[in-house]
Image (tube, helix red, strand yellow):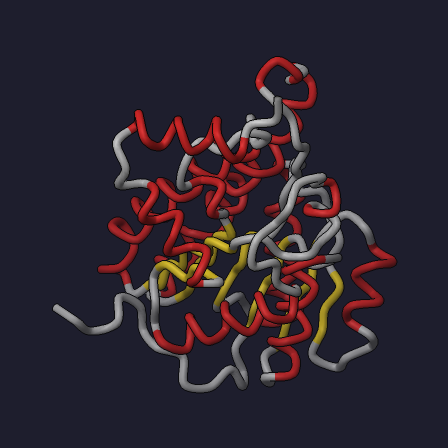
């Protein structure tokens, strides 16, 4: 009843990790952390120069740029990983698009672009990877969602719902794949200092560095956790907020979070 939901990771040596969205922010910090821990890491994103800078000619780093919105590119990239590394033990979906906006500011093209990057691309990757993990009888899938998916926060009109969908997706993936010896990790960061959060004009409580985020994620996986959320002093407050009646919750939003 109280054992870890995933298999704890005792040693990253020899683990083949595919980081999608590794050119900056949490993804880049994770790439460096995994390499430091002895894993072999494939780094993917659109920006080749940034990926090469993160890899820094590390002998266990494979730079594999592609566009996550390109359906065929997923299959091609996966084949290259199988050829170069012999396969993939853990894939982490870190790619994200964010635009702070209220509901009346949404534009159709922007909405579509955000949903393609944050949600649809994850499905493309899962379709490419899950069959081979099931056939091998092992593997791991980590999905970086966000505490913005816990509750309907102002200014996250598209980003928040896309992350809420990833939380739901991670839960059902666990139920589907746990019996097939595939670990599933739901990663819900609070505010992390990245290119995305630099767009925010409001105060971000408990702001962390990408390196702190990467450390928390690795620790969570090493403990075999399903949901890895941090920093706890902020994420636990939002989890408590989920239990509030809507009347109280909406009052708090309007009183403290909604711009006039």
**Visible residue check, residue 197:** yes
Depth check: give the residue in front, 106 or 82. Answer: 106
The C terminus lies in quadrant: top right
Q: Position of residue 43 (x, y in %)?
A: 69, 62
Query: Residue 76 location in percent, x, y?
Result: 65, 49
Q: How many marks?
A: 0
* Residue for point 39% across, 27% down: 250
Residue that protrudes farthest toward the right in the picture: 49
Q: Is residue 166 left or right of residue 29?
A: left
| Residue 246 placement: quadrant | top left
Q: Position of residue 195 (x, y in %)?
A: 75, 49
Looking at the image, residue 101 sits to the left or right of residue 12; the answer is: right
Residue at image position (61%, 63%) is 208
112 to 10, vertically: above or below? above
Q: Nearer the viewer, residue 248 or 55?
A: 248
Query: Residue 6, image x and y in percent?
Result: 31, 68
Q: Nearer the viewer, residue 247 or 76?
A: 247
| Residue found at x 53% / y 40% | 124
Regarding residue 115, the answer to whether it shows in the image is: no
- For the N terminus, the quadrant is bottom left
Q: Residue furthest left?
A: 1
The image shows residue 178, relative to residue 54, as above or below, that is above
Residue at the spot 52% in from the left edge and 60% down from the top edge = 91
């Amino acid at each position: 009843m109280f054992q870890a939901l995933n298999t704890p990771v005792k040693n990253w040596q020899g683990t083949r990790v595919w980081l999608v969205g590794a050119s900056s922010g949490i993804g880049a910090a994770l790439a460096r952390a995994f390499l430091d821990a002895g894993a072999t890491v494939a780094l993917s994103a659109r920006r080749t120069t940034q990926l090469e800078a993160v890899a820094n000619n590390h002998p266990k780093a494979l730079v594999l740029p592609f566009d996550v919105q390109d359906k065929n590119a997923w299959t091609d990239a996966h084949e290259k990983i199988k050829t170069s590394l012999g396969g993939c033990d853990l894939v982490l979906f870190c790619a994200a698009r964010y635009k702070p906006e209220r509901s009346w500011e949404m534009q159709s093209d922007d909405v579509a672009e955000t949903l393609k990057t944050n949600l649809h691309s994850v499905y493309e990757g899962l379709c490419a990877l899950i069959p081979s993990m099931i056939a091998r009888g092992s593997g791991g899938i980590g999905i970086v969602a966000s505490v913005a998916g816990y509750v309907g926060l102002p200014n996250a009109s598209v980003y928040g719902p896309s992350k809420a969908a990833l939380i739901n997706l991670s839960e059902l993936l666990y139920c589907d794949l746990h019996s097939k010896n595939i670990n599933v990790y739901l990663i819900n960061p609070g505010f992390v200092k990245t290119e995305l959060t630099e767009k925010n004009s409001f105060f971000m409580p408990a702001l962390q560095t990408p390196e702190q985020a990467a450390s928390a994620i690795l620790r969570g996986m090493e403990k075999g956790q399903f949901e890895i959320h941090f920093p706890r002093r902020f994420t636990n407050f939002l989890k408590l907020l989920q239990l509030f009646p809507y009347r109280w919750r909406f009052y708090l939003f309007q009183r403290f979070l909604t711009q006039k």
